Image: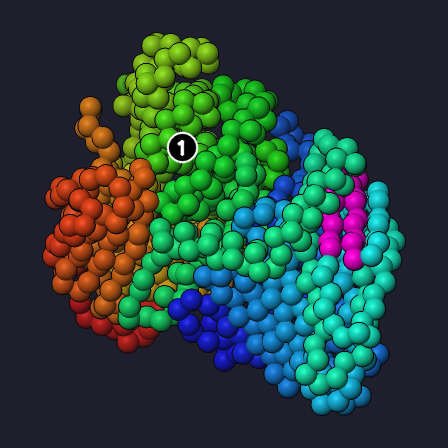
Amino acid sequence: MITHPSFTVEPWCLRETELNLDVLAQSESVFALSNGHVGWRGNLDEGEPHGLPGAYLNGVYERHPLPYAEAGYGYPESGQTMINITDGKIIRLLVDDHPCDLRYGRLLSHERVLDFRSGVLGRKAEWTTPGGRTVRISSRRLVSFTQRAVAAIVYEVEPVDGPTSVAVQSELVANEQLPRFEGDPRVAAATESPLVPEEHFAQDTRLRLVHRTARSGLRVAAAADHLVEGPGSTRWTAQSEPDVSRLTVTADLEPGQPLRLVKFVAYGWSGERSLPAVHDQVDGAVAAAVSTGWDGLVAAQRSYLDRFWAGADVEVEGDAQIQQAVRFALFHVLQAAARGENRAIPAKGLTGTGYDGHSFWDTESYVLPVLTFTAPEAVASALRWRHRTLPAARERARQLGLSGATFPWRTIDGAECSAYWPAGTAAFHVNADIATAVVRYVTVTGDAEFERVEGLDLLVHTARLWRSLGHHDAEGVFHIDGATGPDEYSAFARDNLYTNLMARQNLLAAADAATRHPDRAAEFGVDEEEAAVWRDAAVRMALPYNESLGVHEQAAGFTTLQRWDFEATPPENYPLLLHHPYFDLYRKQVVKQADLVLAMMECPDAFTEEQKARNFAYYEALTVRDSSLSASCQAVLAAETGHLRLAYAYLGEAALMDLDDLEHNTRDGLHIASLAGTWIALVAGFGGMRRYVGEEGKPDRLGFAPLLPEALSRVAFTVLVRGRRVKVDIGESRTRYQLVEGEPMVVLHHKEPMTLVPGEPVDRPTPAAPARPEPQQPPGRRPIGLTTGEQSRAGAE
């Protein structure tokens, strides 16, 4: 989409210079606004035309049955689907009785701008009605970072070429008509008119609707209030019915005489509180918004984002698209999490209903690493949601005959929603992903109280899962059988290397945390013997390795499987899962997404540099990237092993996943983990940022190993570490480290320790990448950014 002629490349905004209905649904996703609690898709103010209308509240869903052809013990019984709640962004316009629908009449100009620094979506249009009257329309929209329940719109209409009668209808609409759902009919049934009316209200300029969901039993309320500015002829009326509450404003306008409407909307929901309580909640929130006013909301929004960008911005010189893309990515990652406040971060954020609004393991493995170093308070919130769902995870483990906790593969409220066991329940690595996120957060922030309370609870119960899931063989080696790793083209493997390495980290972290907090550990029944058992399992963990090939195995025996016939697979057969049976995929050497490569990124101390290079080359030739999660971590290891041109190509693929609609499903919402991967590819890839585990008695160290591809002349980024703000500025010949704020600290530059002191930048040389033969990808699966010319040069090397 960024290459679409309607979109410009600018460093601090996304600008669409004309309306194109062929990319309308995609534009609604990229122009979506959210704060992690409330989400509004970037639909046109007038409601139509639209691709997919959408207003969402984090955690609001409806249940639907998950029937099976044959019953099986332990199968999840019901699914959960995020629903379109009461839409408060609709402001319909009639000009001389002509509804403003830009498919009719003549659209003279249309521009939308999403400003990453102000957090405001602006729109300007000039439209001539079928009757020949021209009006100028402008609007500005935000979802507030500072008032969690609030969104607001300023909408103006002004005649251009003569006196005009206008009517503006500001609405709250529930059970909005959606495009026909193509897919699971059970999900379609759950999302069609999911809200049962409980209360409707309209008086003066105030509106309110209260509904509840039929199966999940959630109560949802929306309220709106307005400020109206217009000529003396301006009048308004309010009316309501069960699914619509509407304020209609009419005025006779002259050229140069605008009608201005400021709309404040507030949302609330609960599964427990009464109708009056939820009703009062949204009335109070909208009253607070009116008191703040539009200008006050905008000023607070800008101030919030100024603080965020001061600690999160990434500067890129040499590629304007990547510069725009990384700020677009960071803005949307922040939107997905900022005010989630102990709720999940869905895979699509609150930008669309893709993946049914579920949260997966990629939250902890892709999104939280970025937020840990840029907006750590959002990480604590997301992990507290996992802690809140711990009782459900422990019950799931008991159901499976295991100890500890088994966290779900996909969920909204903590219950497992995956009906496909091999890629769902068997993907036990989600437990270790959560544990790693806990350790990362505590290490980077120093939040000892979180570790003592929620963190230890999560670490203990995830460690208990591994000890009961795995077993020691006759030689004492600890194995984990029947697990599915990140690569969903392999299932029920023995000793998936990623799973085993992450489980090893989990076990050691739990034992260490229990030692640091013996009083809390005792509350969970953890004694020295149990901690010793965890350490023993970790030390004896099986790490499969093929001696003859000189590479680690993705899982035990993986390298002995038949290799997939890539040469006989036409390009139209990708993604493979849509054209080949899983049975065939499971028994061949073919990798959907980075698995062992991800293990090398997450556990850098477990591999030598030479092992990383050999492993990367071997698995690069097998990885088809049928997942948006793959490109960013392949970029990181490509950079670390010296393949900078390849790393740069993978960076582009991660960065443009949604802006270029690479997987042709951006219409369903953004890929938040791939967006996070843009930061990961730049900071962990070209910045070489790693957290190295310290020796016993020594703290962990943050290290950097900067390298730049030829296409980029500079990459600079800031990370937040234990109350410090560290800026790393990578140039072609030197890298500058600067402690912008905080106490002195030691970091590593290509494993060389150096002390950073405020006001005293430290320069070190940026080395050249080692010369190695470029690894090959499966035929037809080279990253999009690797042109034919670059491929030929890579081959020549």
Q: In x, y percent, where is residue 509?
A: 34, 26
In this view, which residue lies farthest toward the front? 232
Is residue 508 or residue 388 the one in the foreground? Answer: 388
Quadrant in the picture for residue 528: top left
Residue 3 percent coordinates (x, y) = 46, 75
When the figure is inspected, residue 57 is found, relative to residue 90, above or below; the finding is above
Figure quadrant of the C terminus: bottom left
Classify 770 as above or below 525: below
Q: Which kind of residue does numbered mark 1 sit on? A: Val
Is residue 3 visible in the rendered structure shown here? no
Residue 550, image x, y percentages? 21, 43
Q: Is residue 474 above or below residue 1?
A: above
Q: Which of the 4 quarters of the picture holds residue 136?
A: bottom right
Few, some or many C-alpha atoms within 10 Å of disc 1 (few <14, some 14-19, many ≥20)? Answer: many
Q: Is residue 565 left or right of residue 197?
A: left
Q: Is residue 432 left or right of residue 218?
A: left
Residue under pointer 1:
438
Considering the numbered disc 1 on the image, is that residue within a helix, a strand or a loop? helix
Q: Does residue 614 lie above or below 218 as drawn? A: below
Residue at (56% x, 56% y) in the render: 296
Residue at left 24%, top 53%? Answer: 728
Instruction: Tell me if residue 216 is in the magenta stretch.
Output: yes
Residue 319 image point, x, y percent: 32, 70
Magenta stretch: includes residue 529:
no
Nearest the camera: 415 or 132? 132
Q: Which segment is the magenta one?
A: 205-225
